[in-house]
Image (spheres, grey):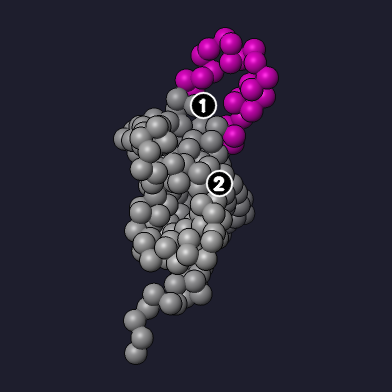
Amino acid sequence: MNFEAINESLPLYFGGTLTTLKLLVVSLVAGLAVALPLGVMRASPKAWLSRPAWCFTYVIRGTPMLVQLFLIYYGLAQFEWMRESIFWLWFKSAWFCAMLAFAVNTCAYTTEIIAGAIKATHAGELEAARSMGMSRRTVLWRILLPSALRRALPAYSNEAIMMLHGTSLASVVTLVDLTGAAREMNSRFYLPFEAFVTAGVFYLALTFILVGAFRAAENRWLIHLKPRQ
């Protein structure tokens, strides 16, 4: 192991870590914000509500995220109407295209997670809320969604970790994230083992932090579901 080269490249990795975290946080927040209403639609017994959400999640989950990223970053640029539109200010940015691709991808998976948690909600919780005179909207926002989101935490933690690893694709559209930093180090020193092992250590550390954060959240909000001693 060439520790001198690794030490010299650490600033590059720290910058890549910051880019990776920005992409992860923005994508998860944007994806979750859209997934909430889509999850409600997906869980609806009404076909005209659930079918569009199902089609969206089916298409996105059925295609690789790399293909989606290429379509957004390279594919849209070939259309003249896009290059002449006001949206080109955003779509010519690699950072925006990567964030959009990641947000759309995690949105589809999170939609299914939320829909599954909604469907698994015990009927007694809803009946108790209705017996107190709550309207459907109040039951949705005060009882159904909070209860479903708490139960969805374990599955959503896996999705967040998968998205962390998925952000490594950002390097293929010129962004210097953690994987991009490893490629840059390899191009400087021709040390692929040291370059990518170092990136792996950074990803492992970030994963450890994410797992700890979600475990703390589960201990706080899912304590009532644990069996009593």
Q: The C terminus is located in which quarter?
A: bottom left
Spot the residue most to the left. 62
Q: Position of residue 129 (x, y in %)?
A: 49, 64
Query: Between residues 37 and 128, which one lies in front from this camera angle?
Result: 128
Q: Is residue 217 visible?
A: yes
Residue hosting label 1: 73
Earlier residue among tags 1 and 2 = 2
Q: Amino acid at mark 1?
A: Tyr
> Per the image, is 92 magenta?
yes
* Total labels drawn: 2
223 on left or right of 64: right
Instruction: Measure the C-alpha gap from mark 1 to mark 2.
Output: 23 Å
Q: Residue at x 34, y 58 (%)?
A: 120
The amino acid sitting under disc 2 is Ala
**Would you name the residue on which mark 2 appears?**
33
Residue nearer the viewer, 220 or 89: 220
Q: Give the answer, above or below, for where 135 lies relative to 66.
A: below
As helix, strand or loop, the secondary structure at mark 1 comes to helix
Q: Local crowd at mark 1 within 10 Å, few (<14), some, or many (≥20)?
A: many
Q: Position of residue 125 (x, y in %)?
A: 42, 65
The mark found on residue 135 in the picture is: none
Image quadrant occupied by the N terminus: bottom left
Task: Give, as a single range, the part of the protein colored magenta.
Answer: 74-96
Helix, strand, or loop for circle 2?
helix
Q: Dot 2, how many residues are within 10 Å of its Cα: few (below 14), some (14-19), or many (20+)?
A: some
The quadrant in which residue 86 appears is: top right
Look at 49% across and 26% down and name the residue there. Answer: 72
The residue sitting at the top extreme is 80
Residue sitting at 59 percent across and 55 percent down? 14
Name the side, left or right, on which 64 lies relative to 204.
left
- Disc 1 + disc 2, Cβ < 8 Å: no
